[in-house]
Image: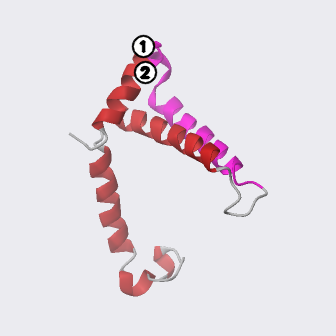
Amino acid sequence: MSDFSTVIQKLLIFRNERDWAQFHNPKDLALAISVEANELLEQFLWKGPDEADREKVKEELADVFAYAFLLADKYQFDVKEIVLEKIKKNAEKYPVDKAKGTAKKYNEL
């Protein structure tokens, strides 16, 4: 069981108490992640990186996580496992000796 299982279970209880599972198909959850990510971006619009309202950033980030966790649950992905797998893949694509200190994409290193 993942480190995120308690959070996911609480999200599922919240959703199920409101009968919202009917709206949470993979497509709509992916769309919701995008919408919430854009609301997160809006907190930084026309501001310096440190000028965003931290409380609003926290709320929007929580929304992004919530929909991402629900989508992971829909596909029965273990959140911890898939993130660790992705870190491993990225480590292969971005070896320290080539990627350190640069923002270049892996195919430009």
* Rendered image quadrant of residue 86: bottom left
Residue 37 is inside the magenta segment = yes
Image point 67% across, 63% down: which residue?
A: 49
| Amino acid identity at mark 1 | Glu
Q: Secondary structure at mark 1?
A: helix
Local crowd size for mark 2, using a 10 Å CA cut-off: few (<14), some (14–19), many (≥20): few
Local crowd size for mark 1, using a 10 Å CA cut-off: few (<14), some (14–19), many (≥20): few
Is residue 17 shown above or below 36?
Answer: above
Where residue 25 sits in the image (x, y, percent)?
A: 46, 26
Q: In the displayed structure, does residue 5 sit left or right of residue 42?
A: left
* Along the viewing direction, whichever of 65 and 104 lies nearer the viewer: 65
Image point 62% across, 39% down: which residue?
A: 35
Where residue 96 sits in the image (x, y, percent)?
A: 37, 82
Where residue 61 sits in the image (x, y, percent)?
A: 54, 45
Which contiguous range is marked in magenta? 18-45
* Along the viewing direction, whichever of 77 and 64 lies nearer the viewer: 64
What's the magenta bit mostly, secondary-structure-wise?
A: helix
Is residue 109 shown above or below 40?
Answer: below
Q: Which residue carries the number 1 mark?
A: 17
Image point 56% across, 36% down: which residue?
A: 31
| Amino acid identity at mark 2 | Phe
- Which numbered circle lies on residue 14? 2
Q: Is residue 76 visible?
A: no
